[in-house]
Image (spheres, rainbow, N blue to C red):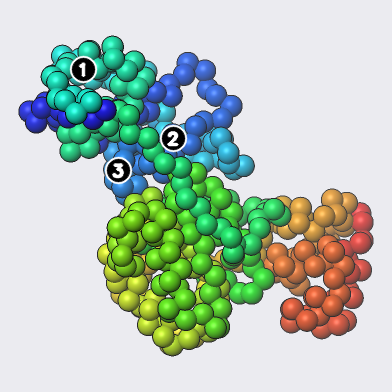
Amino acid sequence: MIVRAVPEHSQLNVNDRVLLHLSRFANDLEPDEYPPEATQLGIAAAIGISRTHVPRAVKGLIKEGLVSEITGRVRGHERRMKVYVATSEGMRKADDLLTAIKDVTFQVARDGRSTAMTGAEIEALVGRKRALVAISQMKDGVVSIDETRRPPVKDLTDAPHAREFYGRDEELDLMEEFMESEARFLVILASRGYGASTLARKFADEQDEADVLWVPISHETTSEDVETRLLAYGRRLRAEVKGVEDLLRLKNLLIVFDGYFSPREELVEFFARLVDMPGDAKIIVTAREDTPAYDRFYQKRHVDSKVVQELRLRGLDEQSAAKLLGNDRIDKEAFRRIMQMTRGQPMALKMLRERDYAGLKSSTLLTAEEVRYLMFLRDKNA
């Protein structure tokens, strides 16, 4: 069923729609977990607007005292996130909006016929909750009642697992801010072994409402390889996707390019074209921090204009490093020296935990003597 509002009555703005949406989850008692729909990304997906429009809307609602921003646990996520809840004043405003809408006349397209109905009649037909959902999703005066939202399409076939993941809350928060910003590219710069790919996978796993495509990059990857992968995935989302430009115009889409380091010259040129293409899709690229300037696909002007954001990874914090190391009785001075020598590099700490002497010797700059010393420190208890 499609409900089309009479033009002079279809003036619900984005703020009103966001408030109506959040009013669905209001509760007198603070829940143990909040629904994903209460996050900025969830709000955007639920009411069908670009995620870049949500911060402005919630900021205005917060200023009016209609919505509160808090940090809480979100269903399906391990870490605490920013969520938005309707205040008591916001609930009163939402009720006023619903009362006013009951007297509005709509044109209802049903079974191939068009019938005039009031908001009250629509509520009687589909119920208050479904009417509230439909009205909050109003777009250009059109409210879709029976339209079902397809589940997200996630292609993480080539992504590494993120079973062992510690810390990085600050980095994950910055990545969430990227998703809510006007920026289109986020480049995660890190030295080998600092967990850029694992961080990107963890973040991709947390995108409940977004379509996600993971594309690995190697020295042998060609621009044709990448374009073929993008278009094959794009056609899974929409049959009308004919080119990369069409794919990038899609909303609620996250593309992760993993392993950008010493690429072919043609691939650098492909990414350079990609960064200048318009669109709503968000793109994350994991890249080596020591990538030469001539191999970087973006320029200072892209960073200055905030088309591209950069995130530089450093070592883990001490608490997270201690968990990864796996010895909760380790001597404090021994642990301090381990952190100093490994700089909190996740790969080195994991190898040390597993007593992987060969791996530490071949994959780090540590000497054989230093590796043996680290093994000794790893087992030194307080």
Q: Nearer the viewer, mark 1 or mark 2?
A: 1
Residue under pointer 1? 119
Taking the spot 52% from the left edge, 57% from the top edge, the residue there is 155
State the residue at coordinates (16%, 25%).
113
**Residue at which label 2 appears:** 37
Q: Which mark is residue 49?
A: 3
Mark 3 is surrounded, within 10 Å at the Cα level, by few (under 14), some (14 to 19) or many (20 or more) other residues, namely some
Q: Which of the pair 86/139 is nearer the observer?
A: 139
Q: Cα distance, mark 1 to mark 2?
A: 24 Å
Query: Mark 1 and mark 3: span between their CA atoms?
Result: 23 Å
Compared with residue 14, is residue 164 higher up or lower down, i.e. above or below? below
The type of residue carrying mark 2 is: Glu
Q: Position of residue 313 (x, y in %)?
A: 57, 66
Q: Position of residue 156 (x, y in %)?
A: 56, 58
**Residue 273 in the figure: left or right of residue 356:** left
Residue at (50%, 44%) from the top-left corner?
A: 208
Residue contact between numbered discs 3 and 2, judged by CB atoms under 8 Å? no
Residue 86 quadrant:
top left
Task: Please tell me how crowded label 1 is: few (under 14), some (14-19), or many (20+) other residues with Cα within 10 Å.
Answer: many
Q: Earlier in the sequence, mark 1 or mark 2?
A: 2
Q: Specify the amino acid type for callout 3.
A: Ile
Whole-percent x, y for residue 261 in the image? 54, 79
Would you say 4 lies left or right of 44 here? left
Circle 1 SS class: helix
